[in-house]
Image: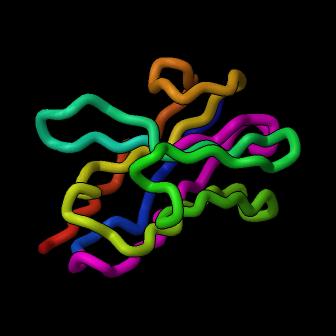
């Protein structure tokens, strides 16, 4: 099993930055694709970014391209989401996820953290 714990959320003004962290434990961290999803009030959980373990490639949802960066530190068993140029529409609970299958849909992942709130004020 894999256990995931997100941190780093908070309140930030539009245009600001936050870095989210997802600490993993359990199975070998590097053997999983690591994804970030978010869920805004009244909205479905949506894909944000994924770090592909085989080769370290990344893929981003269109709304965050050029603003968000996903990275992984295997030594620390941690995946990060650096969020720059934040917009009010980025306000959501952000979740990290681990999966053995590459996916951009939430039910394609096997393990989930509890989420961390990101609020962007205008």
Rendered-image quadrant of the C terminus: bottom left
Q: Left or right of 34: which side holds 119?
A: left
Identify the residue at horizontal 34%, vertical 65% (top origin): 9
Residue 113 as seen in the image, left or right of residue 76: left
Residue 108 vs residue 58, the one in the foreground: 58
Q: Quadrant of residue 106?
A: top left
Q: Residue at x 22, y 73 (%)?
A: 11
Where residue 21 sits: x, y (%)? 52, 62
Residue 85 is situated, as x and y percent measured from the top left of the image, at 38, 74
Which residue is pictured at 80% across the width and 49% down the height?
56
Which residue is located at x 55 percent, y 19 percent?
108
Give the main secondary structure, helix, strand or loop, of the magenta stretch: strand
Left or right: where 115 falls relative to 13: right
Q: How is the image coloured?
A: rainbow
Q: Quadrant of the N terminus?
A: top right
Task: Give the mark count.
Answer: 0
Which residue is the extreme one toward the right?
A: 55
Q: Measured from the top left, where is residue 95 in percent x and y?
A: 41, 44
In this view, the residue in front, 58 or 24, is 58
- In reply to whether residue 35 is colored magenta, the answer given is yes
Q: Position of residue 17 (x, y in %)?
A: 39, 77
Rendered view: 4 above or below 105? below
Residues shaded magenta: 12-36
């Amino acid at each position: 099993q894999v256990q995931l714990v997100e941190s780093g959320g908070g309140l930030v003004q539009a245009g600001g930055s936050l870095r989210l962290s997802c600490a993993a434990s359990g199975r070998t961290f590097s053997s999983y694709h690591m994804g970030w999803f978010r869920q805004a009030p009244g909205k479905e959980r949506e894909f944000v970014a994924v770090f592909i373990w085989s080769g370290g490639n990344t893929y981003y949802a269109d709304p965050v391209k050029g603003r968000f960066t996903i990275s992984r530190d295997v030594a620390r068993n941690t995946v990060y989401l650096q969020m720059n140029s934040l917009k009010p529409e980025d306000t959501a609970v952000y979740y990290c996820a681990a999966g053995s299958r590459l996916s951009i849909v939430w039910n394609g992942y096997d393990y989930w953290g509890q989420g961390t709130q990101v609020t962007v004020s205008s």
